[in-house]
Image (cartoon, rainbow, N blue to C red):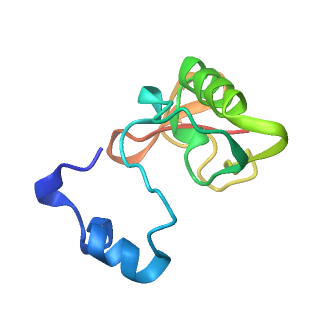
């Protein structure tokens, strides 16, 4: 989570509204604190996140997203595959999970 004093310019409300309008709600914080609202969504796109979570956190994220989908809604997740050059690098901490540079823990699909 980004500390408010460390927020880059793009997190400022005026910047977001200027570029994306006021119709878009952006949440920042830990996905383990989801759900952030009680809304249902036609689609949920999760980019560059799921590979950073442990198995329990991944399961919770997917369950929480699924529970906020409308009927026939879509969930799209991107992840890092075992074909990535970083697979197998660093310390093995679980099945297909490695602690690589600067303590980053990554799960490979």
Count of numbered labels shown in the rendering: 0
The quadrant of the rendering that contains the C terminus is top right
Is 3 left or right of 86, judged from the image as shown? Answer: left
Q: Is residue 73 above or below residue 21?
A: above
Q: Is residue 22 above or below residue 18?
A: above
Q: Residue at x 62, y 40 (%)?
A: 88
Residue 14 pos. (x, y %) = 28, 75
Residue 39 pos. (x, y %) = 59, 38
Name which quarter of the figure residue 61 lies in. top right
* Outermost residue toward the top in this view: 56
* Outermost residue toward the left in this view: 5
Residue nearest the viewer, comparing 32 with 14: 14
Q: Is residue 80 above or below residue 37?
A: below
Is 77 left or right of 18, judged from the image as shown? Answer: right
Q: Residue at x 46, y 75 (%)?
A: 21
Residue 58 pos. (x, y %) = 61, 28
Q: Residue at x 65, y 34 (%)?
A: 65
Residue 95 pos. (x, y %) = 65, 22
Is 33 left or right of 87, judged from the image as shown? Answer: left
Residue nearest the viewer, comparing 60 with 102: 60
Name which quarter of the figure residue 108 lies in. top right
Residue nearest the viewer, comparing 32 with 42: 42
């Amino acid at each position: 989570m980004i500390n408010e004093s460390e927020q880059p310019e793009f997190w400022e409300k005026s910047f977001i509204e200027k570029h994306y309008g006021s119709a878009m709600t952006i949440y920042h914080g830990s996905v383990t604190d989801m759900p952030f609202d009680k809304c249902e969504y036609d689609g949920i796109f999760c980019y560059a996140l799921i590979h950073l979570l442990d198995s329990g956190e991944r399961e919770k994220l997917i369950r929480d997203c699924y529970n906020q989908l409308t009927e026939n809604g879509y969930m799209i997740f991107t992840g890092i595959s075992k074909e990535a050059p970083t697979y197998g690098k660093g310390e093995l901490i679980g099945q297909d999970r490695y602690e690589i540079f600067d303590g980053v823990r990554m799960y490979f699909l």
